[in-house]
Amino acid sequence: MNFINESEIWFLTGSQHLYGEKTLKQVKINSKSIVDHFNGINNIPLKVVFKSVVTSSDEILSVLESANTSKKCVGVITWMHTFSPAKMWIAGLTILKKPLLHLHTQFNRDIPWDDMDMDFMNLNQSAHGDREFGFICSRLGIKRKVVVGYWKEDTVQSRIAVWMRSALAFNESKNLKICRFGDNMRDVAVTEGDKVEAQIKFGWQVKYHGVGDLVESVKNISESEIDTLYKEYESNYNITSAEIENIRYQAKIELGLKKFLDKYNFKAFTTNFEDLHGLEQLPGLACQRLMEQGYGFGAEGDWKQSALVYLMKVMGTGLKGGCSFMEDYTYHLDPVQPAILSAHMLEICPSIAKETPNIEVHPLGIGGKDAPARMVFNVSEGKGINATIVDMGGRMRMIVNPVNVIEPKPLPKLPVARALWVPEPDLETSATAWILAGGAHHTSFSMAINMEYLEDFAEMMGIEFVVIDKKTNIFDFKKELRFNDVYYLLNK
Ligand code: MN
């Protein structure tokens, strides 16, 4: 995945002709030195391209039209170094389709107390120039992130970096193809949803393929291809079961699955254990391996979570910590430390493993197939974010909850990967709020990103964003859900 190297952010500085050429020249020099600084530090993940100092409506429209059609440009940063009368921005902002970040900064950090004259005042006007720009964005209902502070500060750069990664995910989302092998698990409600709405809102193309298409692709995998992949398993993981043939069969599924997905440019997929005709095992290890390679995955036909896993992986590209499909499985209700044990039947991504995973083979209670190979491991301790998307009928709702992964006691008889975590603010409040919000049992869980990434993403997408965290109390939370119902009714 070369998202990071291939994408760029355009930087536009707003001004006007009133100040004269000398000032505009200085505005350009200053803008360039900010952009050069961003391009020279590790804090900023994407290349920033300084476009121009814009001083007229036509100019702004033209550059933002190019931003829309540029394959490389994944977002636009604007900054009003001086005053830029914002009627000039109406035409451009109205057609802008790429994510927008309004950087409210100032070239100088400190007031030059001894030397400040009116020339200085006329050159350094972001304090009011950016407010004029803010007004027109709000008046037009433009979705954007506002970042305030001195551009050399780490905190400012880190907020920009988060937005850049979310902008990458936004652009991936608009081109995302999700493959569903089989349909939804029979009778399950939350994994269903309006795929037309999803394509309108997120850009997701959710496509059905009969599992026979996958079986055909798996059949064509040669023994020598399996030999090579099996060697990779041996060097990356601990193979602790003697059933080599069952593990080799998962290698065969992995190769067939990957070939099929790549052929049609699918970046995410779902399986369904009720629909495995022609496969000898439920894809377990195969799904874990593909998630580890960056594909999104959802079980039981859950295409929304599959897409979210993929997009959260995109946001976390190159960052420490992994991301996986997940399910709230069972509770530890000891009042001393109530916690949630999260896992799935098989399919947890090893990118969040604490130690080298074991590859094990165990029979599966459901599905009526051969014993599937899977990776078994504990998840690293530390902070993570658990998120889900549900279809509320007419709108998509994202629910997020920060959690803290703690060390479980040994689980010698549990043959799946698992995470034991304490959600914010506590299990009782978290589960109450999650259930009131209609949150799914399936989630996407990341230890690479935090809430801010998903907040930025939800803002770009214009979807409902519901947070359960340290500040949550149920009384206010219920009010927020009711307010949101009205808001989305009015803003359909
Ligand atoms: Mn499930």
Image: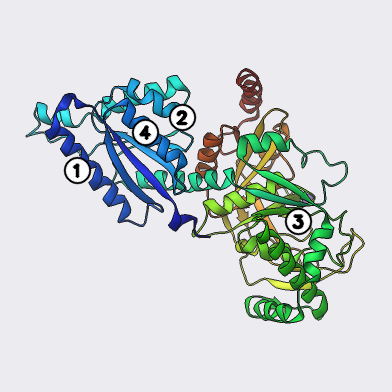
User: Distance between the Cα atoms at labels 2 and 4?
Assistant: 10 Å
Q: Amino acid at mark 4?
A: Ser
User: Distance between the Cα atoms at labels 3 and 2?
Assistant: 43 Å
Above or below, 487 relative to 264:
above
User: Distance between the Cα atoms at labels 3 and 1?
Assistant: 55 Å
Q: Residues within 10 Å of mark 2 (few under 14, many from 20)?
A: few
Q: Which mark is residue 95?
A: 2
**Mark 3 or 2, closer to the camera:** 2
Residue beneath label 3, please? 344
Q: Amino acid at mark 3?
A: His
Q: Earlier in the sequence, mark 3 or mark 1?
A: 1
Q: Which mark is residue 62?
A: 4
Q: Secondary structure at mark 4?
A: helix
Q: Is residue 102 visible?
A: no
Q: Earlier in the sequence, mark 3 or mark 2?
A: 2
Residue beneath label 1, please? 29
Q: Which mark is residue 488?
A: none
Is 367 placed left or right of 479 in the picture?
A: right
Q: Amino acid at mark 2?
A: Ile
**Mark 3 or 1, closer to the camera:** 1
**Mark 3 and mark 4 in contact (Cβ < 8 Å)?**
no
**Mark 2 and mark 3 in contact (Cβ < 8 Å)?**
no
Residue at x 55%, y 42% (from the top left corner): 454
Q: Earlier in the sequence, mark 1 or mark 2?
A: 1
